[in-house]
Image (cartoon, rainbow, N blue to C red):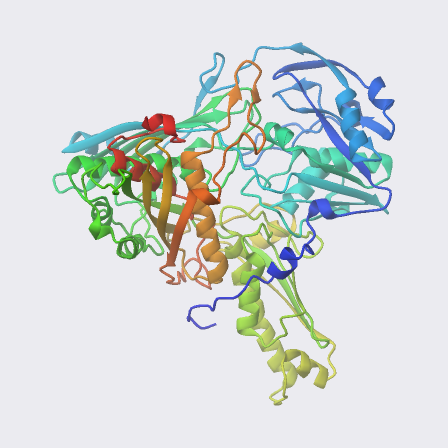
């Protein structure tokens, strides 16, 4: 493979998507299918003492109602680190409001909904704590992140800044609702689900229902948005699977959005206290950073990871990061795009901006002068870091030299306040093992199967780019099979490691196929593409299988992948650390009377190693910037502390960014391969695209108004 930049190619699945041909999980249909609806708990904590189903069973079309009596008890916790045991099915004990207590099965969706509404439930209530400040919440410190001696270095600092920041509870809200269709036939269970981790789903359902994983298949060809919500196993999956087994009929559940708010993971409310010190030369020499967030009583989403990006942003040799869970009685939070860095870099990059202002320094120059090539947490070098190149190119495109430094000094003729803000971001670049099978047929078709899931980020397009660049094959009959446990062992696609898993394996398969073709032809020069060459030598197909692992991994990682294990390498590799970087430049305009904030333009430049699919990479950054605007100025989940439930659990009341909010987003890439990270030289992009952009917006609001706002979302009332 050459090191030349990849050509811009259209999405390989775009034509089918715009025509409505693409089938998502909820589109799957089977004869005799039953429709399911879950019944949520109406209390936040306690024990269900009775469930009355008589009236529900009288609803025409209702076939069966599953209760906790229809399920085995949940597995005991293992006590091991990592993801929790498989989610429980139906239980009498209630841990949070909205927890499913029953599943209604009916011939029609309408009957299932009516039956669910007819069920009556009785509980022995228990006291609960529903928000981070509730009485009864429990603080639980976690392990510190330490580099150098921050206390000693801070004592010698010439100038310091210290401030507290807060990010709200937020929910993912992908357009595609959580969907499960289960089929039990011939002693096998097949699950069609919108999942970023079909192997995780397979193992979790098998464990929850006491099944042999070998008889469970999970398929997730396309996902209508995931963003982390669909990474771990959903509670509903085992419910629907058990329903299919007990009835012998296919069963489908499409969860209502209001229920999804209450049962799926979300971004937790988090609080951040940041202190940074500089020496006489304006170099940042020390940082103390404490982060804490709301957490369920048994959740595992670690607050320690808020430090994973800030500790690697600049050359701060002395860093002390502390963190804590605040355990309350709601469902567990979890991964949501840029899970920890969205909040941590909002806090840290706001603090850096405050420090630059206090020092009278230009915030771009201040960041550039605090560059590093070392990961001070490990002492190892960074495999590549081109953040300064991102800042320099972003400033050039944005016209940063025209910025007036004084806050509140830039105004339009009508009095509109203009603010220019900058912030940077970084995100770990990781790599999972992958197994891939490439088959080229004489009939003109090609089939490539590997680990990965398509959430709209364009992984199929990136795979196709490698195949088409390296092999002379027909593109109109190219099939890329991912998200299918029957086609290849599957790792979870999350954390921006999907492409890093699939693409090096694809490149290896291309090289292996080229060698296989050369061996087959034995030096003969045969006209035509590979399909025609196979037909000429009367070979119906040629197939190769390859595997690839991350730096520092070996054959054990492949073995673990085959067994359904969760094996991801990085960002701390044996001899280096790999991070992706980005710089965002934002202009905001604030109307003088209404105080409405608009964002007419953004420039975002990313260091993500080699760019495999320029079109989908640009789309990832634009999507990340739009979401960062939404997170900074719109989104917050409202919790009713009296009942432990969510008040704005629909798209009418959960406010998100719309087209009118967003102006021009100019995207650029450094596009320098990182060949330490993997054989192709790519680094993760999907997550880092969002990191730092909310801070850039907040910094621009400060520049426009002179008012420093440290709590998201920033709304009109904060500027009145």
**Image coordinates for residue 101, horizontal then vertical, percent:** 72, 23
Q: Position of residue 279 (x, y in %)?
A: 15, 38
Residue at (46% x, 68% y) in the render: 6
Furthest residue toward left: 280
Extreme residue toward the front, this view: 414
* Residue 692 visible from this viewpoint: no
Q: Say above or below: 288 vs 11.
A: above
Number of callouts: 0
Left or right placement of residue 363 versus residue 236 in this view: left
Camera-side residue of 544 and 415: 415
Above or below, 201 against 45 in this view is: below
Which one is in front, 624 or 20?
A: 20
Q: Nearer the viewer, residue 501 or 164?
A: 164
Q: Residue at x 24, y 51 (%)?
A: 400
Q: Residue at x 44, y 29 (%)?
A: 168
513 vs 604: above or below: below
Position of residue 12 in the picture relative to residue 133 (left or right) = right
> In the displayed structure, does residue 294 sit left or right of residue 704?
right
Residue 389: percent from left, percent from top: 29, 57
Residue 137 seen: yes
Quadrant in which the C terminus appears: top left
Residue at the image point whose x is 77% and y is 19% from the top: 119
Residue 245: percent from left, percent from top? 82, 37
Residue 485 vs 512, above or below: the answer is above
Residue 112 quadrant: top right
């Amino acid at each position: 493979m050459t090191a030349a930049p990849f050509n811009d190619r259209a999405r390989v699945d775009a034509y089918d998507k715009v025509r409505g041909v693409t089938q998502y999980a909820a589109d799957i249909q089977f004869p005799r299918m039953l429709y399911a609806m879950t019944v949520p708990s109406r209390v936040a904590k306690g024990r269900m003492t009775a469930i009355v189903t008589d009236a529900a069973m009288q609803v025409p079309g209702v076939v069966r109602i599953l209760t906790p009596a229809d399920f085995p008890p949940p597995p005991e916790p293992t006590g091991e680190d990592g993801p929790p045991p498989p989610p429980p099915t139906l239980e009498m004990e209630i841990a949070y409001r909205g927890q499913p207590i029953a599943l209604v099965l009916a011939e029609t969706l309408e009957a299932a909904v009516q039956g669910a509404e007819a069920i009556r439930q009785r509980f022995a209530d228990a006291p609960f704590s529903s928000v981070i400040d509730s009485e009864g919440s429990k603080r639980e410190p976690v392990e510190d992140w330490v580099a150098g001696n921050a206390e000693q270095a801070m004592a010698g600092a010439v100038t310091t800044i210290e401030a507290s920041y807060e990010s709200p509870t937020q929910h993912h809200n992908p357009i595609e609702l959580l969907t499960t269709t289960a089929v039990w036939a011939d002693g096998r269970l097949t699950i069609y689900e919108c999942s970023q981790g079909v192997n995780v789903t397979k193992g979790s359902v098998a464990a929850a229902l006491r099944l042999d994983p070998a008889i469970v298949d999970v398929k997730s060809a396309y996902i209508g948005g995931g963003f982390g919500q669909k990474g771990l196993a959903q509670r509903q999956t085992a419910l629907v699977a058990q329903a299919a087994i007990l009835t012998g009929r296919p069963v489908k559940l499409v969860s209502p959005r209001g229920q999804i708010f209450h049962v799926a993971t979300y971004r937790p409310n988090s609080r951040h206290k940041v202190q940074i010190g500089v020496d006489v030369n304006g170099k940042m020499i020390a940082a103390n950073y404490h982060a804490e967030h709301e957490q369920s009583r048994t959740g595992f989403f670690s607050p320690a990871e808020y430090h994973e990006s800030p500790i690697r942003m600049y050359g701060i040799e002395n860093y002390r990061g502390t963190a804590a869970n605040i355990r309350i009685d709601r469902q567990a939070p979890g991964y949501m795009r840029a899970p920890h860095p969205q909040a941590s870099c909002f806090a840290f990059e706001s603090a850096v901006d405050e420090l630059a202002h206090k020092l009278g320094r230009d915030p771009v120059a201040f960041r550039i002068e605090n560059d590093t090539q070392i990961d001070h947490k490990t002492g190892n070098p960074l495999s590549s870091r081109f953040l300064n190149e991102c800042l320099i190119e972003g400033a050039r495109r944005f016209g940063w030299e025209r910025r007036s430094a004084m806050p509140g000094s830039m105004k339009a003729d009508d009095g509109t306040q203009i603010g220019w803000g900058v912030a940077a971001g970084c995100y770990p670049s990781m790599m999972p093992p992958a197994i891939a099978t490439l088959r080229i047929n004489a009939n003109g078709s090609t089939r490539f199967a590997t680990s990965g899931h398509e959430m709209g980020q364009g992984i199929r397009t990136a795979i196709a780019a490698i195949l088409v660049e390296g092999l002379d094959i027909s593109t109109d009959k190219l099939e890329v099979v991912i998200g299918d446990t029957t086609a290849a062992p599957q790792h979870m696609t999350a954390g921006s490691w999907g492409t890093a898993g699939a693409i090096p394996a694809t490149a290896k398969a291309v090289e292996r196929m080229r060698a296989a073709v050369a061996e087959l032809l034995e030096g003969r020069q045969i006209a035509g593409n590979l399909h025609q060459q196979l037909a000429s030598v009367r070979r119906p197909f040629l197939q190769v299988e390859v595997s690839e692992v991350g730096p520092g991994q070996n054959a054990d990682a492949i073995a673990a992948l085959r067994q359904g294990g969760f094996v991801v390498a990085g960002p701390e590799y044996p001899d280096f650390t790999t991070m992706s970087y980005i710089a965002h430049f934002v202009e905001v305009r604030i109307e003088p009377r209404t105080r409405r904030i608009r964002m007419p333009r953004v420039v975002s430049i990313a260091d993500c190693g080699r760019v495999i699919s320029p079109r989908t990479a640009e789309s990832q950054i634009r999507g990340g910037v739009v979401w960062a605007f939404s997170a900074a100025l719109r989104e917050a989940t409202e919790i009713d502390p009296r009942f432990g439930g969510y008040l704005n659990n629909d798209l009418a009341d959960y406010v998100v960014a719309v087209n009118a909010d967003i102006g021009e987003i100019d995207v650029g890439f450094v596009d320098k391969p990182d060949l330490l990270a993997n054989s192709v030289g790519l680094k993760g992009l999907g997550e880092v695209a969002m990191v730092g952009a909310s801070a850039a917006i907040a910094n621009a609001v400060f520049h426009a108004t002179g008012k420093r706002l440290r709590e998201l979302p920033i709304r009109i009332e904060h500027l009145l």
